[in-house]
Image (cartoon, rainbow, N blue to C red):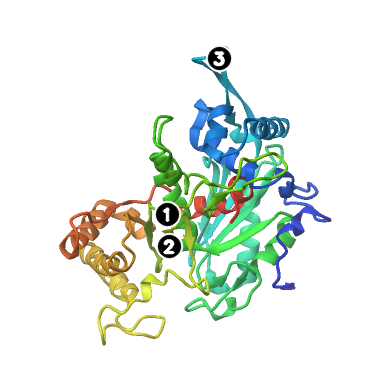
Amino acid sequence: MNRGSGSGNRGSGNSGHRDVYGRRGGVNLPALRGHNDALVLDLLRAAGPAGLGRTELAARTGLTPQAVSKITARLGADGLVAEAGRAASTGGKPRTLLRLVPDARHAVGVHLDRDELLAVRVDLAGRVVAESGGPLDFGAGPEAAVEAVVRAVARVGDPSGPPLLGVGVAAPGPLDHRAGVMGRVTGFPSWKDFPLRGVLEGRLGLPVLLDKDTNAGAAAAAGAWLRATWPDADADADADADVHAGAGAYAGRGVGVGPDAEGAEGAQVYAGGGARTCVYLHIGTGLGAGLWLGGGVYRGARSAAGEFGHQVLLLDGPRCRCGARGCVEALCLEAVARGDVPEAARIVGEAAANLVALLDVDRVLLGGRVVAAAPDVFVAGVGAVLAARALDPARPVVALAGAGVAEGAAEMALTPVFGRG
């Protein structure tokens, strides 16, 4: 297979290619017309079927009512927004409520694990409408994995259904998410420098976004948590902005766009106060962490943040596959292999306590197949260690992640609709 260029132009699927169903191109993402459209759509997504009125949308975005009317008319013409009914008004005729149309567009998320692949198709509300999984030999090399992804996307797709916005792919790190190129994945040297995004765009005829599996997991878990605490219409503005930092977009966007051609009334701080933070811990064939800080995924200076599994907890401990000794991953997975799941949870808790002490997060969210096999043991075990080591009575909550890595990968593909990644 020709590996192609590592540059991976995200828009390459929109001109000259046919998608996996033989349709030309994907959805023209720039036609969604920018940041203010994303703000409105994200608010409607978080509001759910009940919807919001144009007055509420103007108040929460800082846009003028005229600008909101233009935006919602345009989104309605694109099939993304529809009327949800009418609400009583204190000053005249009932207000028209607007809602997101979930089936206007779909996206696909793919989780490439070391020994299995899971693909999901989601609607604009993030609901999974189709999924397909199966074994994967990551060690067989990138070419074989590409073929597996192409087949999986075709299986979850619907040629007669809504247009696909794109495909998000979550893979083991390290990797360069901007260039779409894989890094030196521990134990899998054949993947180094493989331009996965560019190759998949050429095969699928759709935009592809690539990120680490733990970052996708963090986005999915944080989004599910924050949507579950979405405030009602009477909540104060600070709480609204705080929760909304992660309500829909894959990577938080910070501020609403202030004055533009549609008449925003000055720059408006919208989302990104960053008061709600969490760490997502993924425990599967390996261990890793995704960090949700400041309203979005935190990747670090070189996109290498979250190497949770390779903290050294025990000097001169068992050899890890990374070459070091006493890594969290080696200790935890050794305990799992001998059937001592409570000990595995305690080890994860000790490492999690180090992160909590450094980052002062609100919540520790747990996911991955090892956690799924014994969820209560891990929540209780990690929570007990955090409680024992807490320096402050207001220690973080430990809970199960409300969504998986594949869903987070699909959220990556929805980013152009709900915010800028």
- Residue depicted at x 71% and y 54%: 206
Mark with earlier residue (2, 1): 1
Q: Residue at x 31, y 62 (%)?
A: 360
Q: CA distance from mark 2 to mark 1?
A: 16 Å
Q: Tell me whether circle 3 and circle 1 mark residues in contact (CB < 8 Å).
A: no
Is 180 left or right of 306, judged from the image as shown?
right
User: Counting residues from the N terminus, which is met first, the one under dot 2 or under dot 3?
Assistant: 3
Q: Residue furthest top?
A: 92
- The kind of secondary structure element at disc 3 is loop
Labelled disc at residue 94 = 3
Image position, residue 186 (x, y; %): 47, 78
Residue 147 in sight here:
yes
Q: Amino acid at mark 3?
A: Pro
Q: Residue at x 52, y 53 (%)?
A: 252
Mark carried by residue 186? none
Looking at this view, name the residue that lies furthest to the right.
Answer: 16
How far apart in space, not on screen, are marks 3 and 1 (Cα)? 36 Å
Residue at the far front in the pictured view: 266
Picture layout, residue 321 above or below residue 384: below
Q: Which residue is mark 2?
A: 290
Badge 2 local density, few (<14 within 10 Å), some, or many (20+)? many
Distance, label 2 to label 3, CA atoms, is: 45 Å
Q: Which mark is residue 274?
A: 1
- Would you call the spot at circle 1 few (<14 residues within 10 Å), some (14-19), or many (20 or more)? some
